[in-house]
């Protein structure tokens, strides 16, 4: 199947071997029917490239399907497939699932291998990227994840029964006012409050509201930790190098000039990311300190029996290309990657415009079974996936 990463210069590249999770799923009886669209190198919140074009949302063709696993989110939301695989380094499973009204799980990093994945992970990226299942129905998440995890499945104790009434619940309403990140829309604020009310009413639990001031630095945390070297001191490969043909790195400023005249094979988003990376300074000790404090506080809060609710995105699926004007809204998902926590994206119905809305449910490291169990409950309580109306 195609192995392009959305790059025009890789249009004829075909995969010669299955990644282990794909091989294990095929061995279990899954039938691959296609590879779906992503942004270039899976590094943008909208699945757009000059090789395949842009992926639209099945609930409104004028709106985005998200990214990077936007093609997968769209085909699943539109009932074109049953299960899918996504990768997530900044929300690439959760944003498409949120925009397209389906379930998805960002696994604890290191459980599902990224071997033979393109683009490859470098630097510390392996510590923050997660592969996981995407499905219309919550009951499909665990069996698919169990297969995808291969010999590491035992790490998650997925067969261990979860008593929802004995868990500790927390709700984080927002990012404490991060600069340049849009505030959560009122409809999503109200939605999360309704989830809290249902949990307390149905399960007899108390959901505690917590706030972490460090979350206002979510974007800086993600940018900082994506640029750090791995444990052997090896730096991540520069984005402009991976973006270009072998031995021919993209020169972002020149590529931008070409883009202005319609001569570039790269999208504005990719060129902008390459420019942004090249202008980044040294890691800020303050940001590293804030991240480490947030990590410690959240892990102590959650333990092995805590789950939290957190907005996935500030708004429902935006009009296509509008993410270019709000590029930092990924903060709500990206910060969870650098914290290394497992999170399940749960659809919670449609808004007044007929667009999917939902929430992400997280837990402590390797406690994936907890948000997965909550997802099953929320599907029953709120109805799960809703079929898009015929165009």
Image (cartoon, rainbow, N blue to C red):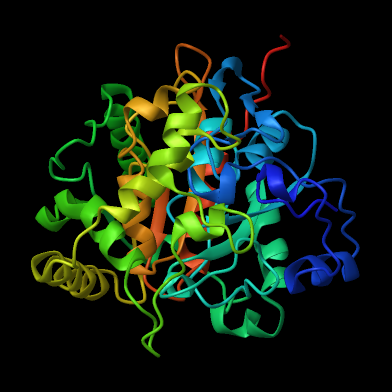
Q: Is residue 67 left or right of residue 269?
A: right
The C terminus appears in which quarter of the rendering? top right
Q: Is residue 120 left or right of residue 206?
A: right
Give the number of callouts. 0
Q: Is residue 127 left or right of residue 290?
A: right
Residue 122's place in the image compared with 11, above or below, is below
Front residue of 170/223: it is 223
Q: Residue at x 39, y 62 (%)?
A: 337
Front residue of 36/151: it is 36
Residue 134's place in the image compared with 266, above or below, is below
Q: Position of residue 34 (x, y in %)?
A: 83, 46
Q: Position of residue 330 (x, y in %)?
A: 36, 43
Front residue of 212/140: it is 212
Front residue of 347/335: it is 335
Q: Quadrant of residue 178?
A: top left
Residue 276 visible in the snapshot: yes
Q: Quadrant of residue 266?
A: top right
Q: Position of residue 239 (x, y in %)?
A: 46, 57
Residue 206 visible in the snapshot: no
Q: Residue at x 82, y 61 (%)?
A: 15
Q: Is residue 166 left or right of residue 99?
A: left
Residue 323's place in the image compared with 141, above or below, is above
Q: Which residue is farthest top?
A: 391
Q: Residue at x 52, y 56 (%)?
A: 249
Q: Residue at x 68, y 13 (%)?
A: 389
Q: Position of residue 372 (x, y in %)?
A: 53, 59
């Amino acid at each position: 199947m195609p192995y392009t990463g959305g790059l025009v210069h890789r249009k004829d590249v075909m995969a010669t071997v299955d990644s282990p999770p794909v091989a294990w799923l095929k061995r279990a009886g899954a039938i691959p029917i296609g590879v779906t669209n992503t942004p270039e190198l899976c590094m943008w919140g909208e699945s757009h490239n000059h090789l395949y074009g842009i992926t639209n949302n099945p609930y409104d063709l004028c709106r985005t399907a998200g990214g990077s696993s936007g093609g997968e989110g769209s085909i699943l939301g539109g009932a074109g497939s049953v299960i899918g695989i996504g990768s997530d380094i900044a929300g690439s499973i959760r944003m498409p699932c949120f925009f397209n009204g389906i379930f998805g799980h960002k696994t604890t990093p290191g459980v599902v291998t990224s071997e033979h994945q393109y683009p490859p992970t470098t630097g510390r990226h392996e510590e923050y990227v997660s592969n996981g299942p995407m499905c219309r129905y919550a009951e499909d998440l665990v069996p698919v994840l169990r297969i995808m995890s291969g010999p590491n499945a035992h790490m998650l104790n997925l067969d261990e029964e979860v008593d929802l009434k004995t868990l500790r619940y927390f709700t984080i309403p927002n990012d404490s006012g991060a600069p340049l990140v849009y505030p959560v829309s009122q409809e999503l604020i109200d939605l999360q409050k309704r989830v809290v009310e249902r949990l307390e009413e149905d399960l007899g639990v108390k959901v505690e509201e917590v706030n972490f001031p460090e979350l206002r630095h979510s974007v800086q945390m993600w940018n900082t930790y994506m640029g750090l070297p791995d444990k052997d001191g090896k730096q991540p490969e520069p984005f402009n190098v991976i973006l270009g043909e072998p031995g021919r790195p993209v020169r972002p400023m020149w590529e931008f000039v070409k883009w202005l005249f319609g001569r570039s094979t790269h999208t504005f988003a990719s060129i902008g990311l390459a420019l942004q990376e090249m202008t980044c300074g040294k890691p800020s000790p303050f940001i590293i300190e804030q991240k480490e404090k947030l990590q410690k506080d959240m892990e102590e809060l959650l333990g092995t029996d805590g789950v939290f609710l957190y907005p996935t995105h500030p708004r429902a699926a935006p009009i296509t290309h509008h993410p270019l004007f709000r590029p930092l809204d990924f903060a709500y998902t990206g910060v969870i990657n650098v914290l290394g926590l497992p999170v399940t994206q749960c659809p919670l119905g449609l808004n007044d415009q007929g667009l999917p809305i939902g929430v992400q449910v997280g837990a402590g490291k390797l406690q994936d079974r907890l948000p997965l169990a909550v997802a099953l409950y929320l599907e029953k309580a709120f109805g799960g996936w809703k079929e898009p109306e015929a165009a």
